Every structure is written in structure tokens, then in C-alpha cells.
Amino acid sequence: MDISVSDAGEFGLISRIRARLRSGESVLLGPGDDAAVVASPDGRTVITTDVLVEDVHFRRDWSSAYQVGRKAAAQNLADIVAMGARPTAIVVGLAAPRDLPLEWADGLVDGLQDECDLMRAGLAGGDVVRSATLSISVTALGDLQGRPPVLRSGAEAGQVVVVAGRLGHAAAGLDLLRAGRREPAALVDAHRMPTVPYAAGLRLAAAGATALIDVSDGLVADLGHIARESGVRIELASDDLPLPPELVEAALALGIDPRSWVAAGGEDHAFAATMSDEAALRAVAMLADLDGPVPFTQVGRVVAGDAGVVFVDEPPPNLAGHDHFAPYS
Ligand SMILES: [Mg+2]
């Protein structure tokens, strides 16, 4: 029989979680006191939060605890990077049903910790409560390291729109799971936990991104945020959307237009930016310097006109984007 979190008790669970944590370099004082102490050398703190709820954002039969942990941390760390900041720490709230297996909590913490390690961020503290519904709330902190934050409002006519990272993989994975498939693993796993190109995001900021966002709701929806906040029009071309063969193959199997995944699928947390042509050339050179290759594509242009995103050719079907209130299954 599985040992559950209620068998361990609140304090037993907390000490078990603490034993699994490694310290982050900015965490001056981690879990164990009334609050944590996190260094913020810049003097300004970037902060963001996200909540994941079972059967709204994840299913325990589709994703392991470890994958949910990776994803919960990744969403928040990506938002910090999308401001041009380096993540320093996260704090986590876990609302757990009494019968949640202790092993599930272990996996969750390992996933959170491993994702934080990618950015040398620390898991600085948290809280556990009993709840009928399993949910995980993560708050992340970041440091601007002396640079201005990169906002959604900085795009200007004449600039290019670029994307670093993958588009449409997580959406393809979710559609495969919905269709009862577990293959190809690369796509299904992209839904279970994103591979966020954090270093590429920071390099886009350093190269001179005038606006930056992580693609969480879908390329068109997220570029729409930039267009509205900047008061510009963004022109995309369906024909210029990156279509890797693995997406085309899965789309053929499901009878779906793969460009819909690329244009409207969220949760891959690629980084979309606007910048000048010269900055884009700098970005190409800076990304070529990364350890692992990250796809980098110009997907459109910023022009003057009514704020919004338009296609200059036939748009892909089903561009609604990710709706946080849509049924998950
Ligand atoms: Mg975001």
C-alpha cells in the first residue's frame, strides 16, 4: 500500500521535502525559518506566479509527478526570462488531497528542483495544505543584473519578429494524448514537460530585443499581447512558420493542419521577440554560441497600423489559441 502525505503529516512531509532540496546560489537562507532570504544584487526583484490545477492543467494518468514539477517550475522561470532577468529562486505551495502518495510529492519536488538547477535557481521555501483538489502554485523571483526589463510594449514598426525555440510541439503532444496515443514520445513529452530555451531567451534580451515574451498561450495570442501593448501591427506569413518534419508527420496521422499547432499551440515556452535587423543578426551569432542548438526563425515583421496580428497570406485554421477555461480532456 502506498504511504500517503497524510500518513507523513504536515511536518513529516516538509522535512521529507527539505531533504530532497539542493541550494541555489542566490538563496541566502532557504526553507526552515519563517521566510527565506534571496539575494537580488540588482536591487530590483522580478516576480511572477502561476497555479497548476489537476484536471485543468495536468492529469496524473498522462504526466508523472516529476513532469508536473518540471512544468510548474518551467512556466514561472520562463516568465522571468521573458523579462530579460535571470531566475534566482522559487517558492512553492502544494495543496494535496490526503491520499496523495508520498512518492508523488517526492517526484514533484525532484522535478521542481531539476528545472531550477537549469538556471541555478533555488527552491527557497513553500507551504503544504490539505485540499480536495491537487494543485501546485509556484512563485518565481529574478534579478535584472543591471539591465532594463524587456517589456511587451517596446516593439516598433520596421523591426522583425523572431522566435527562439520550438513551436507547436506541446500542442501536438496534447492532441496525441487526447486521441489516445502515446507516441511519438518527443511530442507527447513536450506536452508533459517543456524544454525551455532559457539561455536563448536571455541572449535575445542581450542582443537587443525591444519586446520579449514566452510563448505560453500560442504564437498568435502572445504576439497579440506585444502588438496591443506596443500599439503596432504584426504581420505573419503562414508559409514562413517553421514546420519540422515530426510535426508534419503527427499532423498527417491525426488529420490536422500542423500550422495550427505552430501558430496557436502554447506551452512550449519558446521566446518570441521583436528587434531591429542588426539585433537579429547579433542574436543569430549569440545563439550559435550556445551549447545545444536552438531553432531560430524570423516569423514576421512589425508594421504601423491598427494594433493586432494579421496574416499576409491564408491563415492556418483554428487560431483560437490556448483558452485557460477550455475543458482539458
Ligand atoms: Mg509569459
Image (tube, rainbow, N blue to C red):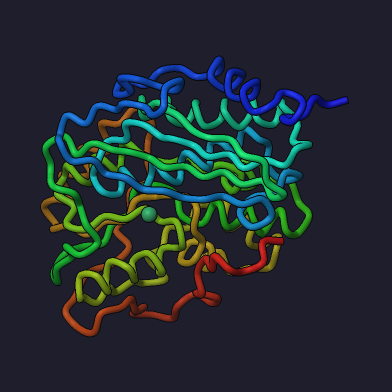
Judge left or right: residue 215 versus residue 170. Answer: left
Q: Ligand 1 is in which quadrant of the figure? A: bottom left
Residue furthest toward the front?
34
Is 83 located above or below residue 302 in the figure? above
Q: Residue at x 11, y 52 (%)?
A: 278
Q: Nearer the viewer, residue 20 or 232?
A: 20
Number of labels in the image equals 0
Q: Residue at x 40, y 18 (%)?
A: 23
User: In the figure, residue 310 lies in which quadrant?
Assistant: bottom left
Is 64 located above or below residue 308 in the figure? above
In the rendered image, residue 152, in percent from the top left (x then y), is placed at 24, 61
User: In the figure, residue 224 lies in which quadrant?
Assistant: bottom left
Q: Nearer the viewer, residue 213 or 247?
A: 213
Q: Residue at x 61, y 54 (%)?
A: 57
Judge left or right: residue 80 versus residue 11. Answer: left
User: In the figure, residue 236 lies in which quadrant?
Assistant: bottom left
In the rendered image, residue 322, in percent from the top left (x then y), is placed at 52, 65
In the rendered image, residue 50, in percent from the top left (x then y), is placed at 46, 50
Residue furthest toward the bottom?
306
Residue furthest toward the top?
19
Q: Nearer the viewer, residue 240 or 88?
A: 88
Is 98 located above or below residue 269 in the figure? above
Q: Residue at x 27, y 35 (%)?
A: 86
Q: Dividing the image into 4 quarters, which one contains the N terminus?
A: top right
Q: Nearer the viewer, residue 42 or 254?
A: 42
Judge left or right: residue 228 versus residue 209. Answer: right
Judge left or right: residue 307 versus residue 252. Answer: left
Q: Dividing the image into 4 quarters, which one contains the C terminus?
A: bottom right
